[in-house]
Image: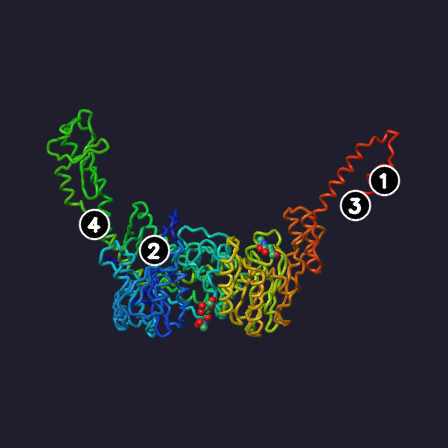
């Protein structure tokens, strides 16, 4: 066959590149097929040894191996927990000869994951020899990878692989060795393929979790970062779950699938790496400048056409590609070239643009022109199979020409056949049916009723279809031997060419992986920029000092629902106001304020602009929360247990760089107990001085202040939500101000709730008396009942008097009936 020749690994062969750089044909406009929703699974291999952890897993969705080089993790295996929570592996494998600690961890994982929405991972133990270092190295180096060109020498291959796999991370290499063994034994993803088809591995992708900000699932939940699922899994969202109202939901303006996934990943991995955060913010800043609006539109347009390349590559390795895959790939590559050209025209001070300019190599041109030269899209669409263009393979062209000329030729043959046929037969034609061959087709005459009537001398009857009788004749047999296999041959040859094309493209898949990685990056940052522009977010500035200064902060979700949203500041410094105690009546906005602080800080830590007028953010290493979610209706001891659990986490793990948000601590327990515990926790933090975390506590325990349970220190700051009494009504301003809310406003809230005025008045009276230490008088005294009776009878008697009667002596009546009783009334 004559195809574009194979070139060296990275640079395209001169001829092809030269023709390609001139101009690429834009993709055909054909209706797109919906992408199939693939069921994806992850299989993980972990090793923990001497305080080092190595994790590697295979994701069937993009056929990639993800690995975390050897990283310190202590005995509670927090990193492992985090990755398992993100990835939700189907299966976790480790060595049978493992440290007890990790064995226990994995067993507990199995037992406690009783949530019906999370599948328990299957724990698989392999003999320790399967994780041997040398064995594992050999297993990696001897494996065939589609992205490694077949002409590479063994040495070149080793060099290439060591540039992407850290062979100096022994634990990781051993875990990877075990993973490969596992994949091949289970035949993950290729269960239904022939045994010669290996599990495809299309890329190796490194991840590091060294600078992650600590946040637990509860925090993700109460801050409404993710809504639809319990787990903020990056990998498992796609399966039809609808994202509810959440931070992810409002930020996800991504245009391609892998952009949405990357945003999710960023949300699960808020980072302390300021270099990384500032890089992201620089790009958003650039997109927000008015003069770059055109560029933004151009980039967004290109992004639309970036398709699910990992899925396409996977189908190619398994030889399951469809014609729509070829179109999607061409479209993607064509648009990627457009993106690169745009990025090349942008300032190279922004690293992302520089990277795209560099890593979107001319291999893209090579791939595009290869597809363009080989694939006959129009023909493929009309025949619904892969067909090649003319001039790709002369033998195919020759065969196609024969077939083209065939119809005239067959008419001629049919004419000759008709001459030899009985005169009753008015017409006939010669047709070709793949796999059966050439046939003589004759219309069924009314006289032909039974099968025996179909017999014609000199012809072999084959079948009846659509009122036409089909026969083989001497001539058609001759045609069969001459041309019969033409169709099949063309089909086979075209399939072969498709395989060659696939191999060539897979060998260049490195550039396609880069395309997916960096377009996802661009996509997320464009989405964040759109969000920032539409909602007037500001760029957060990071400082190495502790504390925050946020001017006019808003809650990113609530502000979208409320007609007007009152913005509020957040200020805390090195030695002042590290602990904020927020009081105020229910529904005055305390919880919203707490969550808003959490969300603004969180958004800054993923590199997004934030809903505020100005934001200066100190270093943060963790966010700890105890905020009651609206769903948790059960108030009681169990709530209090959860409370304690979460607060204990904060007390044990929060550092001076942590943010702690506690809403209504002690709900559900006896007031005195709750109050004492809260005071104890706060006093503990106060005693830490400048090592104290940034704490925001909202409380209804006014006695915390009244009983002066806390020391007088500048670390402590009291905030309250501004309200105003307007007659009977309580007006909420949702404005934070310094101070303590002394009034409970219970009376107003009771009135709003429709409580009878008499009862409220009595409540206020009692409350006042308790406050001022006066005795409380009973109002249900027994003598009162008698008095009532006497009054009633007096009124009755009075009404019986006939005032028009001159004989009635009113004075007498008054003296006899009223005065004595009046005296007792007074
Ligand atoms: C921080 O991120 C940058 C990339 O943005 C990376 O080069 C650097 O190694 C990271 N720093 C650490 C300590 O991981
Ligand atoms: C309102 O505040 C009281 C204490 O003042 C508290 O006990 C109650 O749980 C709060 N109600 C709601 C619905 O939060
Ligand atoms: C965090 O706190 C919990 C207690 O709630 C404790 O079990 C865990 O070991 C602490 N983690 C670290 C890293 O200190």
Q: As displayed, is residue 523 above or below residue 752?
A: below
**Quadrant for the N terminus in the image:** bottom left
Residue at numbered disc 1: 815
> Are the residues flagged by discs 2 and 3 in contact, CB closer than 8 Å?
no
Q: Residue placed at 74% from the left, 42% from the top?
A: 788
Q: Give the number of the mark in front: 1 or 2.
A: 1
Q: Give residue 109's position: percent from left, percent from top.
A: 37, 62
Q: Which residue is mark 2?
A: 312
CA–CA distance in space, label 2 to label 4: 26 Å
Residue picked out by circle 3: 825
Say which label, 1 or 4, has the lower sequence index: 4
The mark that comes first in sequence, 1 or 2, is 2
- Disc 1 versus disc 4: nearer the observer: 1
Gap between marks 3 and 1, in whole Å? 15 Å
Rate crowding at label 4 as few (under 14), some (14 to 19) or many (20 or more) other CA atoms within 10 Å.
some
Please count the marks in the image.
4
* Depicted 27 relative to depicted 431: above or below: below
How far from the left and from the top, in percent, is residue 651?
51, 68
- Residue 489 is marked as 4
Viewer-nearest of labels 2 and 3?
3
Callout 4 secondary element: helix
């Amino acid at each position: 066959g004559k195809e574009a020749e194979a070139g060296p690994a990275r640079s395209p062969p001169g001829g092809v590149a030269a023709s390609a750089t001139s101009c690429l044909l834009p993709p055909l406009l054909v209706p797109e097929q919906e992408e199939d929703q693939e069921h994806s699974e992850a299989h993980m291999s972990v090793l923990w040894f001497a305080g080092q952890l190595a994790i590697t897993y295979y994701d069937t969705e993009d056929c990639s191996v993800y690995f975390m080089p050897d990283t310190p993790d202590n005995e509670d295996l927090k990193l492992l927990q985090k990755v398992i929570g993100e990835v939700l592996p189907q299966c976790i494998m480790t060595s049978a000869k493992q440290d007890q600690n990790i064995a226990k961890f994995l067993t507990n994982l199995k037992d406690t994951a009783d949530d019906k929405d999370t599948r328990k991972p299957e724990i698989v133990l392999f003999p320790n020899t399967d994780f041997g270092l040398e064995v594992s190295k050999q297993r990696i180096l001897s494996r065939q990878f589609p992205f490694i060109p077949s002409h590479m020498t063994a040495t070149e291959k080793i060099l290439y692989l060591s540039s992407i796999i850290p062979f100096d991370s022994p634990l990781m290499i051993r875990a990877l060795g075990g993973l490969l063994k596992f994949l091949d034994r289970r035949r993950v993803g290729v269960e239904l393929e022939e045994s010669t088809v290996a599990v495809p591995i299309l890329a190796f992708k490194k991840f590091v979790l060294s600078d992650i900000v600590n946040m637990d699932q509860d925090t993700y939940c109460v801050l409404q970062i993710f809504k639809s699922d319990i787990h903020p899994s990056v990998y498992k969202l796609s399966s039809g779950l609808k994202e509810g109202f959440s931070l992810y939901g409002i930020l996800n303006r991504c245009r391609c699938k892998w952009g949405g996934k990357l945003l999710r990943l960023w949300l699960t991995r808020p980072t302390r790496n300021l270099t990384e955060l500032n890089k992201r913010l620089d790009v958003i800043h650039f997109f927000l400048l008015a003069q770059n609006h055109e560029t933004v539109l151009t980039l967004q347009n290109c992004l639309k056409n970036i398709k699910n390349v990992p899925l396409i590559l996977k189908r190619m390795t398994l030889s399951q590609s469809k014609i729509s895959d070829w179109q999607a790939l061409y479209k993607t590559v064509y648009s990627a070239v457009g993106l690169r050209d745009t990025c090349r025209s942008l300032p190279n001070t922004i690293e992302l643009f520089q990277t795209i300019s560099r890593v979107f190599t001319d291999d893209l041109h090579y791939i595009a022109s290869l597809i363009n030269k080989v694939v006959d899209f129009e023909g493929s669409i009309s025949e619904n199979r892969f067909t090649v263009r003319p001039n790709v393979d002369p033998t195919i062209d020759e065969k196609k020409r024969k077939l083209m000329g065939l119809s005239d030729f067959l008419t001629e043959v049919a004419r000759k056949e008709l001459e030899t046929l009985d005169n009753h037969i008015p017409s006939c034609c010669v047709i070709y049916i793949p796999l059966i061959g050439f046939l003589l087709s004759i219309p069924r005459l009314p006289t032909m009723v039974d099968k025996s009537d179909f017999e014609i001398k000199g012809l072999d009857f084959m079948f009846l279809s659509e009122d036409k009788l089909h026969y083989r004749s001497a001539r058609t047999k001759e045609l069969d031997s001459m041309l019969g296999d033409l169709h099949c041959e063309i089909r086979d040859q075209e399939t072969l060419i498709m395989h060659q094309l696939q191999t060539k493209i897979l060998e260049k898949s490195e550039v396609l992986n880069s395309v997916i990685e960096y377009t996802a990056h661009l996509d997320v940052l464009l989405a964040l920029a759109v969000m920032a522009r539409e909602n007037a977010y500001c760029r957060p500035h990071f400082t190495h000092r502790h504390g925050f200064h946020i001017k006019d902060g808003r809650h990113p979700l609530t502000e979208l629902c409320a007609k007007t949203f009152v913005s509020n500041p957040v200020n805390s410094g090195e030695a002042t106001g590290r602990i904020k105690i927020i009081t105020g009546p229910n529904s005055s906005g305390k919880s919203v304020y707490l969550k808003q602080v959490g969300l603004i800080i969180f958004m800054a830590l993923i590199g997004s602009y934030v809903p505020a007028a100005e934001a200066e953010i100190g270093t943060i290493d963790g966010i700890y929360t105890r905020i009651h979610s609206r769903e948790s209706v059960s108030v009681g001891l169990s709530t209090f247990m959860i409370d304690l659990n979460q607060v204990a986490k904060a007390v044990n793990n929060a550092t001076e760089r942590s943010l702690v948000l506690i809403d209504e601590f002690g709900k559900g327990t006896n007031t005195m107990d709750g109050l004492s515990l809260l005071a104890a926790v706060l006093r503990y933090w106060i005693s830490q001085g400048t090592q104290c975390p940034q704490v925001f506590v909202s409380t209804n325990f006014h006695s915390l202040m009244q009983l002066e349970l806390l020391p007088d220190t500048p670390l402590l700051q009291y905030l309250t939500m501004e309200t105003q009494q307007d007659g009977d009504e309580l007006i909420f301003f949702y404005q934070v101000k310094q101070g303590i809310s002394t009034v409970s406003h219970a009376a107003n809230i009771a009135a709003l709730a429709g409580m009878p005025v008499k009862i409220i008045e009595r409540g206020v009276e009692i409350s006042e008396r308790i406050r001022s230490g006066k005795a409380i008088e009973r109002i249900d005294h027994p003598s009162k009942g008698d008095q009532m009776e006497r009054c009633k009878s007096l009124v009755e008697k009075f009404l019986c008097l006939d005032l028009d009667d001159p004989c009635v002596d009113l004075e007498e009546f008054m003296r006899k009936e009223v005065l004595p009783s009046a005296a007792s009334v007074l």
